[in-house]
Structures are given as structure tokens and as C-alpha cells.
Image (cartoon, rainbow, N blue to C red):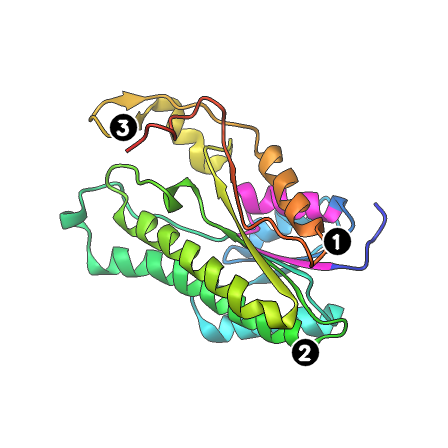
């Protein structure tokens, strides 16, 4: 690996898409900061490469402040934030969800993404050379829902609005922002899909998945663009996944 002098921070880096993207960014020459709540899983991600694990609860403002202070103090700057961390609620009817289940998803998927973007913007504005890139994980649920997915789908729709606001407000500071909407990628999270996934018509169907490395490669492509170019929105999915026609 040849270092490119750039620094990337990945949230939700302890598994799945976050782990794959972290490894791909490191292989592309980035110094990578790994954020997530599970310290042991962050260490697993970092085991095969020299990366910086920082246990973080992105739903907590103080934890986010400490994460970005550590990034600044260690590397002096931040070039790319991949706002990837996310959780979902149980797949039950909306009327049966508790306030606590709803609030937990909003706290991580939306408030956490906002807090990390806010901290990244502050750092990117102040550094020299200034600017950077924020990539938000929107998910296909930013477009259409699955049955019984109100908290997750609502937050992912909101991420699209956040992406557009960051893109607009970041222009004057040389901060680019884009969103990657990801379909079924083969990770721990999608293992349950081998038994079938509930469809809009009430049936269950096994859905195709793609190799997670394709997602990681897409993130690296977005990250590597010069700041005068931007992927505003990208959808990456298994070709035969029932996204077109879903709903």
C-alpha cells in the first residue's frame, strides 16, 4: 500500500459494509479511523491493517466530539467521512413499535449522522488545505420501504434531505457530499435473507445479494474524486434484486 496522505473516518466500521469500506479505503492509501460501539469488532477490522479504532456511540454528542478530536490530534485533518452506521427496529407493524424502539433508530441513523457530519464540517472548514467529502449511506430504503420498516425507512428518507443540505451548505467551504444507496450486500446483516424476506404482497421470497466488495469499491470511487467533482447519488444493488417494482 502507498499512502496517499489522506484521512478517512468510517462509522459502523466493526462489521459489514463499514468493515469492507474501511479495508478498501486503507488499501487505496487512506489513513483510516474506525468508529463503532463494539471495541472488539473494531479491533477485528484493524487486525489486518494499521488503522485507528475509536470506540464511539454516535448518538451521543460528547462521544462524537471525542472521536473527531482524536482524529484531528492524530492525523491533523480529515478528508473523507463515510457516515455508514445504522440500526433497524424489529420488523413488526408500526402500531406495535414502542417509543424506545423508534427513538433508538432515529438516534443512530439520523441524529448520529447529523452529529458526525457537523463535526466533520467544523474540522474540514478549519484545516489547510480546507475542504473534504462526506458520503452518507442512504440505503435503497431512502427510496422505497419494506413492509414493517417505518423507523428505518423514515430515517433513510431523512438522510437524503441531510445529504442535499450538506451539499448546498458545504459548497462555500469546499466540502462535497454524496449519498450511496445500497441494496442487498452479502454481510452478517443479510444472512437472514437466505430464509426469505417479506414482500409487499405478504409472501416471502429469497432475494439476490451482491458481494460487499462492490459496495466498498463504489465508496472508494466516490472518495477518490477531486473536490470539484461529486457523485450526488449512487445506487448499488444486485441486478435481480426486486427494487424496481418493489412497494
Q: Quadrant of residue 129?
A: bottom right
Classify 244 as above or below 179.
Answer: above
Q: Distance between the residues labelled 3 and 2?
A: 47 Å
Q: Which residue does the numbered mark 3 point to in the structure image?
A: 199
Q: Which residue does the numbered mark 1 point to in the structure image?
A: 30
Q: Which of marks 1 and 3 is nearer the N terminus?
A: 1
User: Which residue lies most toward the right here?
Assistant: 2
Q: What stretch is highlighted in magenta?
A: 7-26
Residue 242 drawn at (x, y percent): 38, 26
Q: Earlier in the sequence, mark 3 or mark 2?
A: 2
Q: Which of marks 2 and 1 is nearer the N terminus?
A: 1
Crowd around label 1: few <14 · some 14–19 · many ≥20 (10 Å): many
Residue 119 drawn at (x, y percent): 55, 72
Residue 126 disc label: 2
Q: How far apart are marks 2 and 1 (CA)?
A: 20 Å
Say whether residue 21 is magenta. Answer: yes
The reply, left or right, for residue 90 in relation to residue 74 is left
Q: Quadrant of the C terminus?
A: top left
Classify 212 as above or below 114.
Answer: above
Classify 30 as above or below 20.
Answer: below
Q: Is mark 3 on a helix, strand or loop?
A: loop
Q: Which residue is drawn at 48% across and 53% down?
A: 85
Amino acid at each position: 500500500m502507498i499512502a496517499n496522505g489522506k484521512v478517512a473516518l468510517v462509522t459502523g466500521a466493526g462489521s459489514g459494509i463499514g468493515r469492507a469500506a474501511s479495508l478498501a479505503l486503507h488499501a487505496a492509501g487512506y489513513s483510516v479511523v474506525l468508529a463503532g460501539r463494539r471495541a472488539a469488532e473494531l479491533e477485528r477490522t484493524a487486525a489486518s491493517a494499521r488503522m485507528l479504532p475509536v470506540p464511539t456511540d454516535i448518538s451521543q454528542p460528547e462521544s462524537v466530539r471525542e472521536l473527531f478530536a482524536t482524529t484531528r490530534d492524530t492525523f491533523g485533518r480529515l478528508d473523507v467521512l463515510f457516515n455508514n452506521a445504522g440500526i433497524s427496529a424489529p420488523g413488526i407493524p408500526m402500531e406495535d413499535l414502542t417509543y424506545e424502539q423508534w427513538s433508538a433508530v432515529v438516534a443512530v441513523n439520523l441524529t448520529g449522522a447529523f452529529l458526525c457530519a457537523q463535526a466533520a464540517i467544523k474540522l474540514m472548514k478549519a484545516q489547510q488545505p480546507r475542504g473534504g467529502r462526506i458520503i452518507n449511506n442512504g440505503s435503497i430504503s431512502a427510496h422505497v420501504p419494506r413492509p414493517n420498516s417505518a423507523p428505518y425507512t423514515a430515517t433513510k428518507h431523512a438522510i437524503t434531505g441531510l445529504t442535499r443540505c450538506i451539499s448546498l451548505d458545504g459548497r462555500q467551504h469546499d466540502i462535497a457530499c454524496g449519498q450511496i444507496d445500497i441494496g442487498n450486500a452479502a454481510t452478517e446483516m443479510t444472512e437472514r435473507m437466505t430464509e426469505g424476506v417479506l414482500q409487499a404482497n405478504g409472501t416471502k421470497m429469497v432475494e439476490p445479494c451482491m458481494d460487499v466488495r462492490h459496495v466498498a469499491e463504489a465508496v472508494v470511487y466516490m472518495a477518490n474524486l477531486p473536490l470539484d467533482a461529486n457523485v450526488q447519488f449512487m445506487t448499488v444493488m444486485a441486478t435481480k434484486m426486486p427494487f424496481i417494482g418493489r412497494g
